[in-house]
Image (cartoon, grey):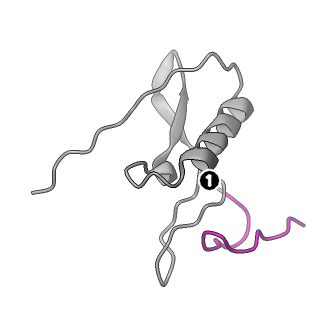
Amino acid sequence: MDDPRWVIHLPTTLTSLATVVALAAALRDSLGHVDVLDFGEVTVSAEDDQGRRTRVWCDARLPGGGRCPLPAAHAGPCRPPGGAVPRRR
């Protein structure tokens, strides 16, 4: 049996989805080397509606290993971590 995983809920004083997603990206960029953090599973929610969460990144499993680091619901194909970012048309 696997041990249960724990989630850290970290409230902010930010007031828009775009800025809280930017903060999540900054945290991923600065703490991505910490193996016990799973940034692919990051979700955000409004303070008064925490039951409705918005996924931040795609995180789809890719052939050959790794997960897609693009935003959730991105257009076009997934890409491997560290791969070239597809151009938007």
Which quadrant of the view contains residue 27? top right
- Determine the residue located farthest toward the bottom in the rendered image: 64
Q: To which residue does mark 1 refer?
A: 72
For this orientation, the residue located farthest to the right is 89
Q: Nearer the viewer, residue 51 or 25?
A: 25
Q: Is residue 51 left or right of residue 60?
A: left
**Does residue 41 appear in this view?**
yes
Q: Look at 66% across and 70% down and name the residue there.
A: 82
Whether 56 is among the magenta residues is no
- Name which residue lies at 54% across and 46% down: 31
Q: Quadrant of the N terminus?
A: bottom left
Question: Looking at the image, which residue is at 66% across and 54% down?
Answer: 71
Sort mark 1 into few (<14), some (14-19) or many (20+) by Cα contacts within 10 Å: some
Q: Please state the horizontal and vertical placement of residue 54, each as a whole percent of the image.
A: 55, 39
Circle 1: residue type: Ala
Stretch of the chain drawn in magenta: 74-89
